[in-house]
Amino acid sequence: MAKPLILIVSSIPIILAIMIAIPMITNPQIPFSAANADDRISVEFTKHHLKKISLGVTDRLTPQKTEILTISNDGVARYLLTEAGSAFPEKTFVLEKAEVKKITALIKETGFMQIPIDVISADEEKTEYVKFSLKIILNGNAKQIQWVEQNATSTLIPPIVTQVGSTLDALLKQAGP
């Protein structure tokens, strides 16, 4: 009699944990309810492919390729590409309102604007890496952060930064050549 009762009582926390985990697993997206119609957002995302060039005594970081994506509140996006010192023509396109709302919700819901880090630098021995820069103005509050790809630094890059960066990098790939 005591063994079935112990099994039932001990299975209650497991069942509750499963009931909490299932919605999180089946819907990992950021809820759109975090963004509202009054939100004003401006995004400037830059991706630099850098290479360290040795000039004898000194080393210099040189951008091999630079991509810049700016997104305004109304969904107008501009894409600029500079490669090997040559600038390509600017591409302008319009994002769907749902995409802008998704980006706004991602920024608000994750607490991105409260991240205490401003710069995550590359390790000295790295000679080639990708550096990202992101400036967001959300409802008059500005946040700017610069970071490098994870394999170029020994510092842990916050998952929030990685998630926002991945979302914007996907837009860069869509707009790119």
Image (cartoon, helix red, strand yellow):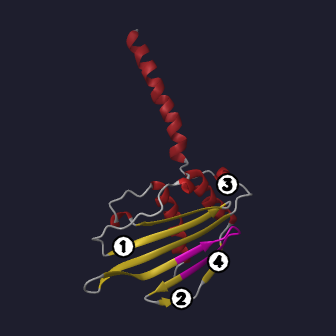
Q: Which residue is mark 1?
A: 129
Q: Which residue is mark 4?
A: 93
Residue 101: image quadrant is: bottom right
- Structural distance between the alpha carbons of marks 4 and 3: 22 Å
- The residue segment tinted magenta is 68-80
Mark 1 neighbour class, 10 Å CA radius: few under 14, some 14 to 19, many 20 or more: some
Taking depth in this image into account, of 59 and 151 the one nearest to the observer is 59
Q: Is residue 69 magenta?
A: yes
In the rendered image, residue 84, in percent from the top left (x then y), is placed at: 43, 88
- On screen, residue 171 versus residue 94, left or right, reads left
What secondary structure prevails in the magenta region? strand
Disc number placed over residue 88 in the picture, else none: 2
- Nearer the camera: disc 2 or disc 1: 1
Q: Which residue is mark 3?
A: 35
Disc number placed over residue 97 in the picture, else none: none
* Residue under the image location 60 percent in, 73 percent down: 70
- Structural distance between the alpha carbons of marks 2 and 3: 34 Å
Dot placed on the residue nearer the N-terminal end, 4 or 3: 3
- Structural distance between the alpha carbons of marks 3 and 1: 34 Å
Badge 4 marks a residue whose secondary structure is: strand
Above or below, comparing residue 83 to residue 121 in the picture: below
Above or below, comparing residue 17 to residue 31 in the picture: above
- On screen, residue 91 versus residue 48, left or right, reads right
For the residue marked with disc 1, what is the amino acid?
A: Tyr
Mark 3 neighbour class, 10 Å CA radius: few under 14, some 14 to 19, many 20 or more: some
Q: Are marks 3 and 1 in contact (CB under 8 Å)?
A: no
For the residue marked with disc 2, what is the amino acid?
A: Phe
In the rendered image, residue 114, in percent from the top left (x then y), is placed at: 55, 53
Dot placed on the residue nearer the N-terminal end, 3 or 1: 3
- Structural distance between the alpha carbons of marks 2 and 1: 22 Å
